[in-house]
Image (cartoon, grey):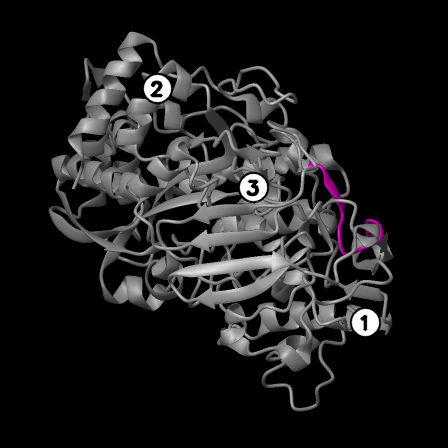
């Protein structure tokens, strides 16, 4: 149910001209607090060690297992205890998109026309127990996360699609009786790993920034239960984990700054409190009891209204883009939305201004008309389904014409949203109100973020059985390119039976081919042109209704050090080196 007071307050703020002006603001290396300072510089830069950094989260993550997760905030957070082959250098805004070696000693060496990629792992690396980290552990990490989909289904499946996987016969390490593993990943020695692909992949260095390339010692793997006791290859290790309550990390004594130019290992302890009400998190951030909201999706509506009317508090906020889109996915496998005319009717009928208000107003994102966000290379401005208003009332002429062509009459359907994201529930409620006007009666069903993709929205059998025609979705780039943004939500081969992100179940041969051809092209400009073409062709299919180009409004705790908002992790703060003032 929509909460009226935040939206009303935000509307008042908009008319009064009190909203933050995008991502401007001065850099702050000296620590003086200004609005948006962390989007242009590092706030409270410090190498001071000690203390406890406290994180909090309104729900619980789907998993802490780096090979079995797909939320940006866990990809960000997991780097504290799991080092991928490459990662992103901490930096403000787009500077945070700079890719650098992490577990690898250097970027990959490409051969065979871009079908073979070789990495050398840094020497002297150790797990928390002192045992050496080897290339075989990286190989095993990729095998378990991409091929044992019946056990670990929550991450992307890029490697499964692109590796030469023994003609599809490899079923993952848990079912591999030979223990030989994939032939398409070679480890000629303990410090070398070679990936053999079916076809060229020009952006492979970005792909291996996924936590799926973090090493996993096979002898310590516990399958789905590995999330409870991940073996650390990073600067911190698990001290204790109470499922659904709290995770505590402490310094990994085997970590060495000599083998890691990125991490600083500043706090003595990192505590993550789970299932804390968002309003409580907001209060604790302002009081200094919590340094970071792990979700990184911003304060709630009531807190937002308070912050923006208090200049002192507003100075500690960061309003950032993060290569993200909020949209409604239309399920092409559920009638009548298997008909493109029905989907086009939804495009015209869904009142985006009303949804924008429900989501938090312009400060939380401008109205969207494309699938690619404005801050990703390849974005081109266009609008295939322009909305016309008479005052504040949306003109439904085009919507009704397409609905008549569709011939569905009055229909009932279900829309899904995440229960722990009130703004998403509010957005879904607004969608329902819009669609009633053309004869679509939708009921809302909500589920927690931790189960949204594993059990509900991401399970095609569930959505088809339960007449789920519409799903609320927020999507950010897996890596900051058009392919890293588009592939997992548009390609037919990305459709999974659990943990699915292609919620519309789009499997269009032309779009699939454009994606496949683009990623094989070594010419970056040509790839970006193709990504824009894919965007437009997908909108012609009307399977995604873009709502807003998401902007986060985070509160920056003045006690936290090394705070910087990064595009690489959806506008969140970079969690790699956050400390606390002593």
Are dots 3 and 2 in contact, CB under 8 Å? no
| Rendered view: 416 above or below 433 | below
Q: Is residue 102 magenta?
A: yes
In the image, taking residue 169 as reference, residue 60 lies left or right, namely left
Location of residue 279 in the rendering, given as x and y in whole percent from the top left corner: 29, 39
| Rendered view: 107 above or below 187 | above
**Around disc 1, counting alpha carbons within 10 Å, would you say few (fewer than 14), some (14 to 19), or many (20 or more)?**
some
**Around disc 2, counting alpha carbons within 10 Å, would you say few (fewer than 14), some (14 to 19), or many (20 or more)?**
some
Q: Give the magenta-colored segment's residue range.
A: 98-108
* Precedes in sequence: disc 1 or disc 2: 1
Location of residue 183 in the rendering, given as x and y in whole percent from the top left corner: 76, 76
* Precedes in sequence: disc 3 or disc 1: 1
In the image, taking residue 170 as reference, residue 547 lies left or right, namely left
Q: Is residue 39 magenta?
A: no
Location of residue 509 in the rendering, given as x and y in whole percent from the top left corner: 52, 54
Residue 373 visible in the current orientation: no
Quadrant, the N terminus: top left
> Mark number for residue 494?
none
> Mark number for residue 308?
2
Q: Which SS does the magenta portion mostly show?
A: loop
| Rendered view: 170 above or below 23 | below
Q: Quadrant of residue 546?
A: top left
* Precedes in sequence: disc 3 or disc 2: 2
Q: Nearer the viewer, mark 3 or mark 1?
A: 3
Q: Nearer the viewer, mark 3 or mark 2?
A: 2
Q: Secondary structure at mark 2?
A: helix
- Which residue is label 1 attached to? 186
In the image, taking residue 431 as reference, residue 554 lies left or right, namely right
- Which residue is label 3 attached to? 569
């Amino acid at each position: 149910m929509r909460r009226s007071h935040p939206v009303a307050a935000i509307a008042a703020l908009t008319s009064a001209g009190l909203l933050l002006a995008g991502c401007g603001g001065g850099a702050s290396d000296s620590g003086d607090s200004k609005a948006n300072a962390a989007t242009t510089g590092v706030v409270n830069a410090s190498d001071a060690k000690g203390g406890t950094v406290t994180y909090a989260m309104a729900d619980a993550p789907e998993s802490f297992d780096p090979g079995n997760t797909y939320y940006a905030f866990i990809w960000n957070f997991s780097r504290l205890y799991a080092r991928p082959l490459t990662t992103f250098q901490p930096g403000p805004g787009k500077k945070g998109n700079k890719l650098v070696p992490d577990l690898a000693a250097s970027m990959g060496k490409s051969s065979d026309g871009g079908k073979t990629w070789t990495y050398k792992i840094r020497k002297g690396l150790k797990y928390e127990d002192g045992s050496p980290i080897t290339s075989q552990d990286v190989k095993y990490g990729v095998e378990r996360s991409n091929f044992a989909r019946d056990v670990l289904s929550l991450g992307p499946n890029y490697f499964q699609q692109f590796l030469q996987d023994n003609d599809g016969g490899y079923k993952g390490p848990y079912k591999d009786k030979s223990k030989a593993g994939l032939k398409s990943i070679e480890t000629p020695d303990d410090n070398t790993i070679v990936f053999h692909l079916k076809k060229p992949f020009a952006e492979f260095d970005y792909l291996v920034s996924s936590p799926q390339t973090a090493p996993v010692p096979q002898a310590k793997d516990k399958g789905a239960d590995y999330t409870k006791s991940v073996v650390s290859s990073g600067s911190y290790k698990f001290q204790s984990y109470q499922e659904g309550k709290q995770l505590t990390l402490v310094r990994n004594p085997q970590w060495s700054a000599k083998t890691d130019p990125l991490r600083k290992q500043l706090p003595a302890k990192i505590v993550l409190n789970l299932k804390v009400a968002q309003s409580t998190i907001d209060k604790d951030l302002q009081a200094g009891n919590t340094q970071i909201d792990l979700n990184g999706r911003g304060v709630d509506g009531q807190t937002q209204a308070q912050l923006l009317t208090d200049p002192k508090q507003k100075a500690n906020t960061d309003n950032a883009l993060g290569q993200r889109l909020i949209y409604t996915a239309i399920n092409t496998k559920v009638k009548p939305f298997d008909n493109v005319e029905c989907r086009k009717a939804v495009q015209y009928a869904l009142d985006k201004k009303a949804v924008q208000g429900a989501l938090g107003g312009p400060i939380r994102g401008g109205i969207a008309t494309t699938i690619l966000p404005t801050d990703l290379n390849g974005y081109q401005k266009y609008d295939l389904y322009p909305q016309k208003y008479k005052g504040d009332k949306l003109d439904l002429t085009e919507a009704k014409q397409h609905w008549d062509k569709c011939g569905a009459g009055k229909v009932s359907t279900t829309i899904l949203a995440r229960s722990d994201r009130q703004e998403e529930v509010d957005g879904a409620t607004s969608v329902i109100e819009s669609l009633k006007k053309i004869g679509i009666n939708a009921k809302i069903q909500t589920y927690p973020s931790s189960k949204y993709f594993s059990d509900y929205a991401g399970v095609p059998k569930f959505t088809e059985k339960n007449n789920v025609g519409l799903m609320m979705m927020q999507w950010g780039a897996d890596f900051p390119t058009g392919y890293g943004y588009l592939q997992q939500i548009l390609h037919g081969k990305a459709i999974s039976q659990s943990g699915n992100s292609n919620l519309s179940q789009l499997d269009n041969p032309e779009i699939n081919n454009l994606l496949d051809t683009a990623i094989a092209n070594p010419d970056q400009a040509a790839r970006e042109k193709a990504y824009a073409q894919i965007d437009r062709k997908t909108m012609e299919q009307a399977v995604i209704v873009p709502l807003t180009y998401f902007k986060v409004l985070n509160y920056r705790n003045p006690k936290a050090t090394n705070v910087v908002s990064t595009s690489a992790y959806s506008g969140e703060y970079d969690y790699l080196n956050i400390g606390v003032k002593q």
